[in-house]
Image (cartoon, helix red, strand yellow):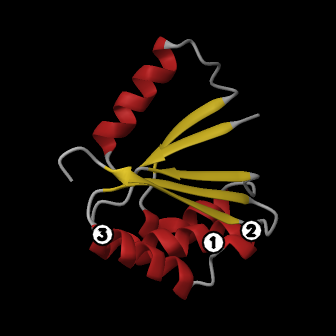
Amino acid sequence: AFVVATDGDARVCANLRHNVALNDVDERRCRVEEFRWEDHAAFFSREAPFDSVVAADCVYDADVAPALAATLAGALRRNPRCDVWVANAVRNAETWAATEAALLARGLDLEDGVSVVAGVAAAGG
């Protein structure tokens, strides 16, 4: 298997690269790339179709939910058989509701191969 680990923040990507190196992961098996959801079309045009996409704990603001949904839809357009997982702690019910609405607006639901796992409310949330 080959993994592309992404984040939109260069500092997080630097930490990801550090952890990949620290764990002696072969660079032929894992690559870290800075990726902003707004740039999903360009990203997917240069990548092979993915077999699986995991979006884990990445929705903190309702304003980014449409970009996340567009990105996941883009992954499924490239490979309709792609398994898509969204796992997120529910820190704010309104933000999570906006995320669900954005996914549904793109036609992304369990029938389309998108598994949405909403975690329990985060501590203090």
Q: Is residue 52 left or right of residue 12?
A: right
Instruction: Please name the amino acid that badge 2 sits on.
Output: Arg
The answer to whether 88 appears left or right of 52 in the picture is: left
Residue depicted at 63% across the width and 53% down the height? 53
Q: Earlier in the sequence, mark 3 or mark 1?
A: 1
* Residue 2 x %, y %: 71, 36
Q: Position of residue 106 (x, y in %)?
A: 57, 84
Residue beneath disc 2: 78
Residue under pointer 1: 74
Q: Secondary structure at mark 3?
A: helix
- The residue at the point 36 percent across, 32 percent down is 14
Secondary structure of the residue carrying numbered label 1: helix
Dot 2 alpha-carbon crowd within 10 angstroms: few under 14, some 14 to 19, many 20 or more: some
Q: Residue at x 41, y 21 (%)?
A: 18
Q: Is residue 15 left or right of residue 114?
A: left
Quarter holding the N terminus is: top right
The numbered mark at residue 93 is 3
Say which of marks 3 and 1 sits in front. 3
